[in-house]
Image (cartoon, rainbow, N blue to C red):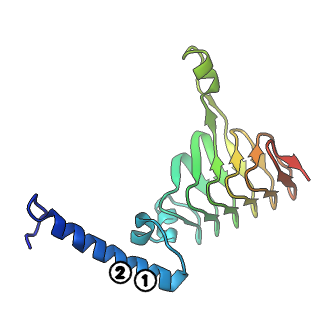
Amino acid sequence: MDAEPSAENVDEWLARIRSFLTILATRKKREFHRRVSIGDLLTEREDNAAAYGFGEGTTMYDNVLVLGDVRIGRHTWIGPGCILDGSGGGLEIGDWCSISAGAQIYTHHTVNRSISLGRLPVDYAPTRIGNGVYLGPNAIVQMGVTIGDRSVIGANSLVNRDIPAGARAFGSPARLR
């Protein structure tokens, strides 16, 4: 086989790549009992987080979208398919948080720009998540919100106002329970 793929040997290269990915997938399944995307076969979650300068012991899946100024503390888990938007003044997430699969945390929105046909600017505000916060699957945190330490945000909740420390909030919009 040639050293580089060409039109003539592309099928051979694809077969080699698929074989390699199958080996990686089998190893991941054996070690962690999970099936993951190709990006997560090729990377380690702790290395993904370290590449962004996130705190010691923090992990995140390869398919997490990170925008702008995002700072995350130690031992925080960022699940697959999350959006971490720090483009509007910064996003801070504390230590020992769980940001579940599909969660979206924003620091900007384009509502006013859109409805004004571009006459108004994009709106920005920093967003803060305290220490020990659990953010449920597919939860959405709007720009400018602060979630206090040790709070629990339920799955599919829309957080559009500050949540005090130790609170439990669920629903759309999220209400204290």
Residue 120 in the figure: left or right of residue 155? left
Task: Evaluate if marks 2 and 1 touch, with contact meaning CB atoms under 8 Å apart.
Answer: yes
Work out which quarter of the rendered image holds the N terminus and state it: bottom left
The image shows residue 162 at horizontal and vertical percentages of 81, 43
Element marked by disc 2? helix
Residue sitting nearer the eye, 158 or 162: 158
Give the residue type at disc 1: Arg
Q: Which residue is mark 2?
A: 23
Question: Which of 14 and 157 lies nearest the eye of the viewer?
Answer: 14
Q: Residues within 10 Å of mark 1 (few under 14, many from 20)?
A: some
Q: Quadrant of residue 125?
A: top right
Q: Is residue 59 above or below residue 126?
A: below
| Amino acid beneath label 2 | Ile
Picture coordinates of residue 28, whole percent (x, y): 46, 79
Q: Residue furthest bottom?
A: 30
Left-right relation of 10 to 95 = left
Q: Position of residue 63 (x, y in %)?
A: 49, 58
On residue 103, the disc is: none
Depth check: give the residue in front, 104 or 145: 104
Q: Is residue 34 left or right of residue 8?
A: right
Residue 27, which numbered label? 1
**Residue 5 against residue 27 in the figure, above or below:** above
Give the x, y percent position of residue 45.
51, 69
Q: Residue 155 vs residue 9: left or right?
A: right
Q: Name the residue rendered at 75%, 60% in the picture.
A: 133
Report, in whole angstroms, how far the alpha carbon at label 2 lies from the one at label 1: 6 Å
Q: Residue at x 10, y 58 (%)?
A: 7
Look at 23% across and 67% down and name the residue there: 14
